[in-house]
Each structure stands twice: as structure tokens, then as C-alpha cells.
Image: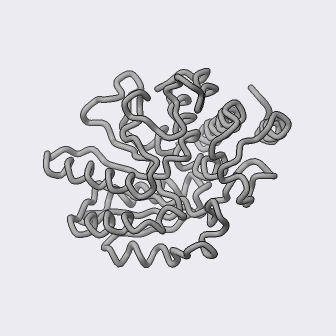
Amino acid sequence: MDIAKLEQIATEVRKSIIKETNAAGSGHPGGSLSAADFLTYLYFEEMNVDPKNPKKEDRDRFVLSKGHCAPLLYAVLAEKGFIPKEDLLTLRKIDSYLQGHPDMKHTPGVDMSSGSLGQGISTAVGMALAAKLNNEDYRVYTLLGDGEIEEGQVWEAAMFAGHRKLDNLTVIVDNNNLQIDGTVEEVCSPYPIDKKFEAFNFQVMSIDGHDFEAIQKALDEAKKCQDMPTAIILNTVKGKGVSFMENNVSWHGSAPNADQAKQALEELGGEQ
């Protein structure tokens, strides 16, 4: 693992998130920025995927359960070579294949359309079960928001995954502690998150979601675990990398204007 290289890629991903949402005039930068480090590691170090063959049968699967953070997924897919980087600026525009939420029918590298909160993890559980039934060895990863886990459907899926001992499934919760209406504690507290997943027979780890070494260790432990799925709770900063967005709930679903985008890109090291 080359941490310096991963940090460079994650920075480019964050720049793309800013550019995308600025060009669209809408979108969700806050939660996209908070999970940028994890998704960078997942695609560049962990998952078995091939941009030249997005639908290869033995690929690992990823489901963005918090589908509103599509700017993050698109930025990572572009860095990995699934889609052209210049297409990122068409986010949410008429006739663009880069919709406000991921669309598996039109976007290379997207394994599942998502957006309705709670449904992504349910689909991921189904994918993991399918792998078991078909004796396939691919792994399934799904990223949820901490506000999203207030959805009851999340826990139905978790119950099933634990019951069926889906050790090929890794559920990741981006715990930045902010959702659209405020802190998750104020809106409808899901804490303690770790104890809830443990109650559904998950192996659970809580890590610094911006630490690549911690991410590597957690994913390695997930692969070693047998007869139970894994949940990784990422402790992150909403809007990570942009000073005026960090820990600011107003950036959950607001796009930066031209001046704000310029400042954000400068803080991220300028356009390169």
C-alpha cells in the first residue's frame, strides 16, 4: 500500500466532487467528501474490479446504499478509468448518464441503482446470498450513511445477513454524525451503532475513516472472518478537506457556487 499515492487519489476525488456539484448547481458534497478516503482505498487496493470489463462475473460488488452521494462514486469510477473524467461535469444534467443517484443501466461500474435509503444494503445482502448459493467467491461491499441506518429496512437486512452467516458481506457505515436535518443524535439517534450490529451477529469494527492503515486492517479482518458478516463503522468528518464544509450540516445537500468552489479547490491543492 502506497499511502502517499492513495492520499493523492483521494484528493483528486474530492476535487472532482467539488467540480461536479458546482457544475450541477445541486448535489450532496458533505457526505461524499467524508467517505472519499474509504472508497478510494476500496477501489484502488481492495476490490477485484476491471474498468475494461465492468461486468466480469467474478468481480467484487459495491452498492452505494446512501445513493445521494453519487458524486463520490462517480469521481472514484472516473479515477479508476470506468468513465471519462470530463463527463463528471454533466452530473444531473438533462441527457447525462450521471444522474443524481447511481443508475446501473447506464453507468459502467455501477452494480446497483440506489437512492431510496435502506434498499442498497438489502440488495447487497441479496448479492452476497447469491454468491453463496452459486458457490462464487466474490465479496460484496455496501456503504451506508449514519442517518440512513434510522431506516427499519436496514435492520431487517442486517438480521437476515447475520442469520445466514454471510461472511462475504461487508457493511460500512459513514458515521459523520450529520444528516440533512441536523445531528443524528438530535434527529433519531442510532447509537450505539456497534452494539446494534453485534446484536445481529456481525463482526464489528470502529475506525478512523480517514486513516488508510486503519482501513486496510479492518478490511483484512473482514476477509478473515468466518460465518458472520462484518460491519465497519467509519468515524469521519462531514465535508472533509474543505474548511467551510467540515462539520457543517448545511453542506449535506447544497452545492458550492463559483467562489466557494474556487476556495475549496485551492484548499485541496489547486486544480492540476
Is 111 drawn above or below residue 167 in the view shown?
above
Q: Residue furthest front?
A: 94
Residue 103 place in picture, x, y as percent: 43, 35
Residue 254 place in picture, x, y as percent: 70, 47
Give the side of residue 95 with respect to residue 86, left or right: left
The residue that appears at 60% across and 70% down in the rendered structure is 184
Foreground residue among 230 and 8: 230
Render colour scheme: one colour
Give the side of residue 185 with respect to residue 257, left or right: left
Give the side of residue 170 with respect to residue 26, left or right: left
Foreground residue among 7 and 94: 94
The residue that appears at 54% across and 47% down in the rendered structure is 68
The residue that appears at 55% across and 30% down in the rendered structure is 79
Quadrant of the rendered structure where residue 47 is? top left
Residue 211 place in picture, x, y as percent: 60, 55
Quadrant of the rendered structure where residue 85 is? top right
Is 237 drawn above or below residue 77 in the view shown?
below
The residue that appears at 66% across and 46% down in the rendered structure is 29
Give the side of residue 178 with respect to residue 228, left or right: right
Quadrant of the rendered structure where residue 207 is? bottom right
Is 150 drawn above or below residue 116 in the view shown?
below
Q: Residue furthest left?
A: 134
Residue 200 place in picture, x, y as percent: 32, 74
Number of numbered discs on residues: 0
Quadrant holding the C terminus = top right
